[in-house]
Amino acid sequence: MKNSKLTMFIFAGLLLGILFGWLCPAVAVKMQPLAEMFLRMVKMIISPLIFATLVVGIAGHGDIKNLGKIGLKTIIYFEIVTTLALIMGLLLANIFKPGVGFNIDLSTVSMSAVQKMQTIHIDHSLTHLLTDTIPTSLFQALAEGNLLQIVVFAIFFALAICGIGQKAKPVLSFLQSVCDIMFKFTEYVMYFAPIGVFGAISVTVAQNGIWILASYAKFIGIVYLSLTLFVLTVLAVVCKIIKIPFSALIKALKEPALLAFSTASSEAALPHAMDIMEKFGVPKNIVSFVMPTGYTFNLDGSTMYLALTSLFCAQLVGIELSLHQQIAIMLTLMLTSKGIAGVPRVALVVLVGTLSSFNIPVVGVAILLGIDQILDMARTTVNLIGNCVATTVVARWENNFDYKKMAEFALENEK
C-alpha cells in the first residue's frame, strides 16, 4: 500500500468514525474492540523493535564513544523545550483566561473519579526516577513496555557485544535481521490502521456526544490553538535553527501524526514514526535512543497542557495566582511531568497532585474528564511531533544528519 493511499484510508476511517459515532452512538460504543486490537498489534511491535534497533545502532555502527554525548545532548534539549512548553502554557493561559466566564454549574459536577485520582501516588523523587530506569528483568520490561528500561538494557547489551568483538557477530547479525523483520511487521500492521482509527474515533464521539464540542468549544479551541502555536513557533523555529525544512518534516509525519491524533495513543504511532525518521535522514542509533527516551522526558504537548489547565482550574474557582505562584507551579510541573509514562490518564493524575500541592480546588479536573479524550488527541500528536523534531536536533548537533537521504525520501513520498 502506497503511503498516499494509506493516509487517505486513515483519513477516511477518521471521518467515517466521526459520522458513525454521531449517527449511531448505540452501535458505535461497541466498536472499542477494533481500536483495542489495533493498539495491541502495535504494542507487540514496540519492545522488540526498540531493543533490536538500539543494539544494532550502537554496536553495529561503532558509536560507543559518542553514546554519552548523545545522551547528554538529548537530555539538555528535552529540558530546554519542555521548559519553553511550560512557559508558553502559562503565558497563553494568562492571555486567553480559559477558566474565566466558564458557564457550568460546579455543584452538578461529579467528583468521584477525581477522588480516585487523588489516591494514586507517584514517586517523583530523583532517586526513584534513576532506580526505575534499571530493569530487574529484560522480559518483564519487554512485557510491560517500559521503554526507558528497555533502552538501558539495550545500551549495556550493545556495550557487551562490542567488548566481546567477533564472537558476538552472530548475535549482531541476528538482531539486524530482527530489525528488518520488525519494520516489515510494522508495515503489515499499518494496513489495519484505518480500521483501528475508525473504532477509536467512533467510540470517542459516541461516548462524549458530538454536542460536547459545542458545550466546551471555547476551552477545546484554546487548548488546540495553544498547542498549534507551540508547534508553529517553538518546534518550527527549532527546525529553522538547525536548517531542517519543517514543512518537509510535517509532510513526512502525516501518517503517524494522523494515527496519534485519531487514536490518542503515542504507541500507535511510535513504530511507524521511528521508521520514517530513519528514512528521513536520522541515524538508527539516534532514532532508537531519542524517541523512546522522549516519551519519558519530552512530552511537549502534555507538559504545555498541564501548565494551561493548572491556571484554568484556578481561574474556574476565582483564584488569582501571583507571578511567584505561577513560577512555583511551573517548577513543580518540571519535576512531576517526568518519568510518569504508563499511568492511566497520567496528565490528569499529575494535574490533581499539582493543584492539591497549591491548595487549588480540583473541581476543574472533573470537568476536564468529560473531554479528556478529545484534548488527549491534540497533546498526543504534539508529543509525537516534538520527539521527532528532537531526533533531528540531536542528529544535527552530532553533524550526523543525512540531507541526501531526506531529499530522496521527500522525492519518493511525492510519487
Image (cartoon, rainbow, N blue to C red):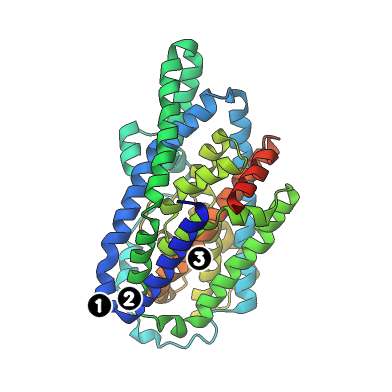
Q: Quadrant of residue 52?
A: top left
* Crowd around label 2: few <14 · some 14–19 · many ≥20 (10 Å): many
Local secondary structure at mark 3: helix
Q: Is residue 78 visible?
A: no
Distance of label 1 from label 2 (alpha carbons): 7 Å
| Mark positioned earlier in the residue sequence (3 or 1) | 1
* Crowd around label 3: few <14 · some 14–19 · many ≥20 (10 Å): many
Q: Quadrant of residue 117?
A: bottom left
Distance of label 3 from label 1 (alpha carbons): 26 Å
User: Which residue does the numbered mark 2 point to in the structure image?
Assistant: 206
Select label 3 or label 1 by which is in front. Answer: 1
Q: Quadrant of residue 108?
A: bottom left
User: Residue at the spot x=60%, y=41% of the render?
Assistant: 74
Image coords of residue 161 (percent x, y): 47, 19
| Mark positioned earlier in the residue sequence (3 or 2) | 2
Is 65 placed above or below 78 here? above
User: Residue at the spot x=55%, y=35% of the render?
Assistant: 284
Q: Nearer the viewer, residue 346 or 46?
A: 46
* Crowd around label 1: few <14 · some 14–19 · many ≥20 (10 Å): some
Contact check, label 1 and label 2, Cβ < 8 Å: yes
User: Which residue does the numbered mark 3 point to in the structure image?
Assistant: 378
- Could you tell me the amino acid type at mark 3? Ala
Local secondary structure at mark 1: helix
Q: Nearer the viewer, residue 30 or 252?
A: 252
User: Which residue does the numbered mark 1 point to in the structure image?
Assistant: 26
Asked whether, in this view, residue 67 is left or right of residue 400, the answer is left
Distance of label 3 from label 2 (alpha carbons): 19 Å
